[in-house]
Image (cartoon, grey):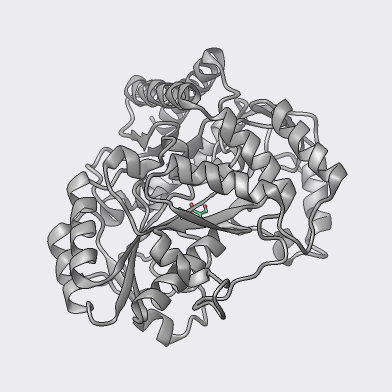
Amino acid sequence: MYPDSQSRSSQLYARAKHSLPGGNTRTTVFMKPYPIYAASGAGCRVVDVDGVSRIDCINNFTALIHGHGQPEVVAAACAQIARGTSFGMPTEAEIELAELLCARVASIEAVRFTNSGTEAVMMAIKAARAFTGKRKIAKVEGAYHGSYDYAETSLDATPANWGEGSPLSVPYAQGTPQGVLDDVVVLPFNDIEATEALLRTHAASLAGVLVDPVPNRVGLIPASEAYLAALRRLTTELGMLLIIDEVITLRLASGGAQSRYGVVPDLTTVGKIMGGGFPVGAVGGRAEVMAVFDPSTGRPAVPHGGTFSANPVTMAAGLTAMRLLDEAAHARLNAQGDRLRDMIRAAFANAGLPGQATGVGSLIKVHFHARPIRDYRSAFPTAEEQGLLSRLVLELLNRGVITASYGLIALSSAMDDADIATIGAAFDDALRAIAASAS
Ligand SMILES: Cc1ncc(COP(=O)(O)O)c(C=O)c1O
């Protein structure tokens, strides 16, 4: 049972506190009173350092689309490691992975690799500035795009600081320069009228609009097709670039979420699943825009290096993982997501608790309220709802299911129907236990 002060995880955490701030090196995996330390993973299961095996519904925050230790991905990575882990030279593998992305995502004509989604978003923003000669960026309130200062503006805005009417630019990290906040226009998700007014007001200085089509922190509800179509129309008319962040949503279709919702951006950022479990990111898009990175005719408009960018281990593992993710694998994952969403909805009803499961395909998010969700503000949980979510995460953990602290679930192709049923049953049991203790 978690927590257990005698566990090896607890001991490791006590040790970690001496060399890592708060014992932590990655805020997203922090847990009180201590995080559970992983020992190994195989398929859809992770075994912790105390020998407890659980079904992994986080999959390293959506990155491990095939679960842990997929044999072909492991073989490709190991073979490349034996040949060399990184070079001060390009390798053929980067061409192959770039070709795969160009073939699958219709709007991508050229690709630039990075080491993370954060860097991919940063390079997309820099490209938009260089291409348009303008400096501001617009992003959706509450949406997560990694830790570049501009992209994280208003990530955790609250009713106390988000402002009446048009969303204010709220700093995420203390010390964020005012100049950064002044250069970010914060948009209300799915509100075409208000978004249009903001884009028109700032048109002369706006380089681009950054949008995740199914933003996790905005409630994991999709942008309406009308909203995406409006963004496309307005960015074209007003001389800005449309940047679609598919760092998470590339797992929803081989052409990305943009192919599901019929929007054609200028730039797309990807990452996570594309690295086969290794650090990765990429920005891709229209050749004319991507030319800002082109060094072949002199100094590029946006010079970009990166010691480990396009390293061959990531490229080899990523290529194998992406090839395994064919149309049949996508269809199966999406169907399993639909099934589990239905099971979670039924579990809320069985327990007599208000709640809902949002998301698309293999991405699911749990909410302890039944309010219609349209944007960050309507998804925003009360303190009581947040408390219930934390309790659910704990109840699931002690029933052998790992989910993210903020209620996110990302399935893997390593799960079969029996695993989905096991996860659904754990939800049913956990929610009944919560209802029983509340009554
Ligand atoms: C939509 C989105 N964009 C960007 C990022 C940043 O990616 P990374 O964690 O690889 O820096 C994330 C990470 O979760 C993300 O969800």
Place residue 76 in its image quadrant. Answer: top right
Nearest the viewer among 263 and 368 is 263
Q: In screen coordinates, is 291 left or right of 228?
A: right
Residue extending furthest toward the top: 418
Q: In screen coordinates, is 181 left or right of 87?
A: left
Nearest the viewer among 358 and 128 is 128
* Place of residue 315 in the rendered image (x, y in percent of width and height, measured from the top left): 67, 46
At horizontal 67% and vertical 36% (from top left) the residue drawn is 2
* Place of residue 234 in the rendered image (x, y in percent of width and height, measured from the top left): 19, 64
Whether residue 61 can be seen here: no
Nearest the viewer among 416 and 76 is 76
Q: In screen coordinates, is 76 left or right of 419?
A: right
At horizontal 42% and vertical 36% (from top left) the residue drawn is 252
At horizontal 43% and vertical 75% (from top left) the residue drawn is 171
Above or below 433: residue 269: below
Place residue 274 in its image quadrant. Answer: top right
Nearest the viewer among 253 and 437 is 253
Above or below 392: residue 53: above
Q: In screen coordinates, is 265 left or right of 149?
A: left
* Place of residue 392 in the rendered image (x, y in percent of width and height, measured from the top left): 49, 36
Residue extending furthest toward the left: 193
Above or below 405: residue 1: above
At horizontal 49% and vertical 78% (from top left) the residue drawn is 301
